Image (cartoon, helix red, strand yellow):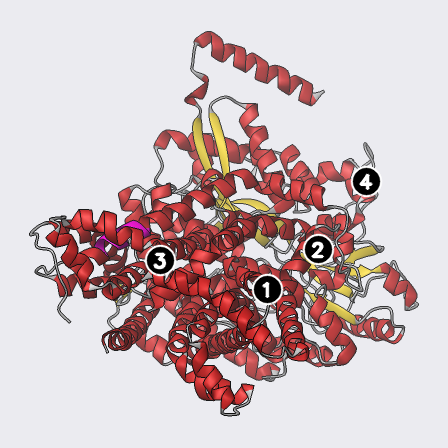
Amino acid sequence: MSTLAREDALARPAQMVVAERRRRPFPWGALTVHGLLLVAVAVIAFPLYYAFVISTQEVSEVIQKPPRLLPSAHLVENYYEAWQRSGMGRLLLNSTIVAVGVAVGKISISILSAFAIVYFRFRGRQFVFWMIFVTLMLPIPVRILPTYEVIGNLGWLNTYAGLTVPLMASATATFLFRQFYLTMPNELAEAAQLDGAGPMRFLWSILLPLSWANIAALFVVLFIYGWNEYFWPLLITNTEEMRTVVIGLESLIPRSGTELPTWNYIMAGAMMALLPPVAVILFMQRWFVRGLIESEK
Amino acid sequence: MEAFSRRWTALAVAVGVLLIGMPAQAKTEIHFWHAMTGQLGTSLEAQAKQFNESQGEYEVKPLRKGNYAQTLTAAIAAYRQKNPPHIVQVFEVGTQTMLMSGAVYPVYDLMKHYEIPVKWNDFIKPVVGYYTKDGKLYSMPYNSSTPIFYYNKDAFKKAGLAPDKPPKTWKDVEAYAKKILAAGAAKCGFSTGWPSWTMVENMHATHDQPFASKNNGFGGVEGVELLVNRAFGQKHIGQLAAWQKDNVYSYGGRGGAADPKFVNGDCAMYVQSSALIGGFTRGVKFDWGTGELPHWGAPYRKATSIIGGATLWVLKGKPEAEYRGVARFLEFLAKPEQQMWWHVNTGYLAISNTAVRNLEQGYHFVRNPKQYTAFAQLTGLPPTPPAAMAGKKAAPAKAERVATANSSGLRLGNFVQIRDVIESEMENIFAGKKSAKQGLDDAVAKSNALLKDFAATYKQ
Amino acid sequence: MRRTVFANRWLPYLLVLPQVLVTVVFFFWPAAKSFYLSVFKSPPFGGRDIFVGLDNFTALLTTSDYYDSVVSSFVFAGGVTGLSVVGGLVVAALANQKIRGLTLYRTALLWPYGIAPAIAGIIFLFIFHPAYGILPYFFSFVTAYEFNWLLRGWIAMALVITATAWTHLGYNIAFFLAGLQAIPTSVVEAASVDGAGPVRRFTAIVLPLISPVTFYLVVVNMVFAFFGSFGVIHAVTLGGPGHATEIMVYKLWKDGFIGLDLGSSAAQSVILMAVVIGLTVLQFRFAEKKVTY
């Protein structure tokens, strides 16, 4: 299945070259398309560029009119200051632990439960199935206070377990794996049974290798979800040492209205906080995009 | 000298501890949840650190839990989990909720229990009055401020106005604003921070008008109703809405959202918390001054303003032995030198008369006249700082403002939501969606429902 | 179609156990607790619960504020979905032309998906800022109209919609691009031989072919806008001005966590849960059909 997709992907550029060579290229059309795409890229990238520009300026440059659109010379000191003020090292570490924890945990439990639902017939299967799937889209803010109490009863306040496990309580990943398993040809399981392979062996050496693209795609999605979660970590962390970066960034923003916001530090902090998830997308985009497509089928 | 001797004391204590052989890590932790960010947070941490170094038994651990609302929510959730912090910083609008909660160890009782002498009478009345019930102070005032009037002296000069004469009445404000606009010295006359606090709560107080029935809520929970839709409220808010149309006034959002309007020079005048003096001193490039809140004049009496900010509440549910440390920390914060340090570093008010007197004698107000405005407005004293002279006693100044029941604070249940309701309706009025009367009527109706709800929740 | 299954008495239970455990502990138990709280009035610090029956629900359903928040939610979700799905489709269609540097463009368009809504909110807050913002500054040359989101509800709404749509645009582009590339080139080429212009080709042939992707994205974006964008509103408008950007989730949070009205907040949870579960079942039925036809 996925080898087919790969061949298809390899074949496409060659086709394109042939098509271009055969047909008269209309440079005007291509130029227009390039132009429009560049405009789109510019529009999309501008907010980030501007945030970066602000992060390199002094406070007086930040509020000057007309606004200054070019980076200034204070990059190092602003980033240093933002890093120091917010204790960025620890924040980034915590966010990494939470994001990876949520991604790995949720993917693991989802693979197992989706496998059970698709490849076994057991009493209560329908019940379990629906029980999991009603939670498909239920967001955490809707049930946050009782969830907090549960965490308290478990003694998980201010722990990594408390930060990650409740975020795994959603069925999106299970749903995607189930969809994916359903597209697997029946012969795979039949062949495995003929070979005398047990279910866990089938899962481990046949299903998993075929699911890498999905796993990678989900990893990206869940990593970002865990990294960007704002509300939950704010509520359950009790010490600065357990804060995640999206929350820690808040400490740079004076909210009480008694101080002038140092926008340059805020933006410097924002740049540092958004870099890891964006980097994950960029580095994993090949698998991410393909995994998305296959999961969606 | 003092620091020197303190260091020696600390050393002596440390040596003593070593001799007795008490392990150094046996310090009892005191958890202190707060909502201070930036410079304020740094000052708070410095204070805690100083306390920790001043003695060897207790370790105060400050933790920022988000903004005021988030801090309170976190403390409530933790209390319900039977693991609250010892101390939590709560904004003034949460006072009634805290008083009714049954979760609080009143500061007065705490200090009495540990036999720590505190001169309660030395505290500035409008500050402690806000947090006192049945003659007992329930929470320790920490960061208190009051709204004052800021103005851009450069813009005043450009418009041909006297740079040392801030407007005294709202009529002045209008006239000045029109001159400033005509001279092109600014784009708008004035703006406001914390709209409900500065323009509704404090305007009612300084004009000796009731904000709510039952003595602004001090008379009980049952049957309290808001009174801001009366003639005075309609007049003031209606006027703001009219001024909004010709840029005499420019609404700039809630909290501190409008601060940049003043800092940028867009608006020449600004009503905001006195605690911003520090921030403006660092951030404002032009010459600026402060004045007292403008007044509408007769027939309204000129009364003192009310405070805002937050206090420290001690929560029940911790081991008995640890409260001694809490009491010691609060005692430390109440010391005049800590009060002075906090005031000078943050711009929040020093809350004991001794601290204020010491500041005066140290020529603090002569050198920083802007810092005096808030004290004058709260106590009713004349707005110019007395030329304090060491040794020579200045003649007692005659009060210019009266302290009345209407100006001694507000005590309302669900006040956080009420403020939100009032500010939402102000926005509707200023945006021209509703008339002042309609908006205020709606605000009162919604607030009364909230007050009724609060009373029902706590019904005996 | 009959699927091959494995026979084992205990293994399937063991396999679903972690998921079931997490779901029960962190979903069903809290949900049950919300139901419980929704029929009580409770002081925030606890100590007593006064049974009030359905009062919390009737209080909500008889005030205009709640309906306003329902309307705001749909305006917001509709705006975000419209902007990011249509925008995503247009950009993806452009990028799907036979041009060089496709991967480069895709990379340049995809990354905003990684940015937290709260952080996107902070960035857009600055760009729209009435005093410092670059956008109001440039608009001030064009028109005297004051683009003040602190006072004008629709500007505030436009601001939070833009910020939210921005973070989700990349995701939509990636999906559409994938959908478009899965269309066999022969189909489109056949149409161009028939003399159909590029726009006609797109609307008559391409659009129907990618309708499943579009449907999926509309649902995902709606849900994301309804629930995932709390951080934007919290970081930027706090629901104001007036109640212009107070969407349902934000109101629920505000009443519960700022207003400390646990009963009303729980009642709002219950209403939202019902809506969401309804939506999930609907979407699921649809997806089921799509898979099995």
Name the residue that disc number 1 marks: C101
Give the Cα distance between marks 1 and 4.
75 Å
Name the residue that disc number 2 marks: A53
Label drawn at residue A214 = 3
Q: Position of residue B157 (x, y in %)?
A: 91, 63
Give the Cα distance between marks 2 and 1.
27 Å
Amino acid identity at mark 2: Val
Give the Cα distance between marks 4 and 2.
49 Å
- Report the mark closest to the observer, 4 or 3: 3
Chain of the residue under the numbered disc 3 shown in the image? A
Q: Are marks 4 and 3 on the same chain?
A: no
Label drawn at residue B388 = 4
Amino acid identity at mark 1: Gly
Q: Circle 2: is it few (<14), some (14-19), or many (20+) Cα within 10 Å?
A: many
Whether C77 is drawn above or below A273: the answer is below
The residue range painted magenta reads: A106-113
Amino acid identity at mark 4: Ala
- Residue at the spot x=68%, y=18% of the render? B4
Chain of the residue under the numbered disc 2 shown in the image? A
Residue B416 seen in the figure: yes
For label 3, the SS is helix
Q: Is residue B111 left or right of residue B129?
A: left
Amino acid identity at mark 3: Asn
The answer to whether mark 2 and mark 1 are in CB contact below 8 A is no
Is A258 within the magenta? Answer: no
Chain of the residue under the numbered disc 4 shown in the image? B
Quadrant in which the C terminus of chain B appears: bottom left
